[in-house]
Image: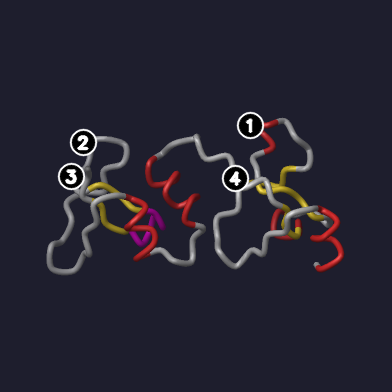
Amino acid sequence: MCVCFASSPAEKCVTDCEEGQGATCGGLANPFSDNLFADPRSCCLAELGWRFIEFCEADSLLTSCYTGTGKYYRGDTAGKAVCVRDCDPEVTGDTTCGGLVEDTYVVFHDTAEECCSIE
């Protein structure tokens, strides 16, 4: 269990500990102004609702285990004029990947055809 709080500048949840005490450390929390949580997921849900929860949690934990949903989204958010998949092209080598989606405003589709017909 960790004690986590949202770091507005970093847009992720960090651990309550003195700076330099680990990669996820965000400094000492202010018990009067910071809401404290038992884990990064709870923190992300409550404090960073505009971020895609799974991405926020992985970003907060500094893990590369999150590989995306694999679903399709309109690629102009990734600088492409076609529908692309929510995955990391550098990790997978898959040219249909447009990058990991960070924010909840992006609409996902199950297939490329569905994405292209709607978007």
Residue type at mark 3 is: Cys
Question: Badge 1 is on which residue?
Answer: 91
Q: Is residue 64 above or below residue 39?
A: above
Q: Are marks 3 and 4 in contact (CB under 8 Å)?
A: no
Give the camera-side residue of 41 and 17.
41
Q: Position of residue 24 (x, y in %)?
A: 31, 41
Q: Earlier in the sequence, mark 1 or mark 4?
A: 4
Q: Earlier in the sequence, mark 3 or mark 4?
A: 3
Residue type at mark 2 is: Gln
Mark 1 to mark 4 CA distance (whole Å):
11 Å
8 in magenta:
yes
Q: Position of residue 76 (x, y in %)?
A: 75, 60
Residue at 22%, 64% in the rendered image: 35
Question: Badge 2 is on which residue?
Answer: 21
Quarter of the image where the C terminus is located: bottom right
In which image quadrant can residue 2 be found? top left
In this picture the colour scheme is: secondary structure
Residue at 83%, 57% in the rendered image: 81
Chief SS of the magenta region:
loop
Residue type at mark 4 is: Gly
Q: Residues within 10 Å of mark 1 (few under 14, many from 20)?
A: few
Mark 3 to mark 4 CA distance (whole Å):
29 Å
Left or right position of 34 against 52: left
Secondary element at tag 2: loop
Mark 2 to mark 1 CA distance (whole Å):
29 Å
Q: Earlier in the sequence, mark 2 or mark 1?
A: 2
Q: Are marks 2 and 1 in contact (CB under 8 Å)?
A: no
Q: Say which mark, if any, is on residue 68.
A: 4
Mark 2 to mark 3 CA distance (whole Å):
7 Å
Q: Say which mark, if any, is on residue 17.
A: 3
In which image quadrant can residue 31 be found? bottom left
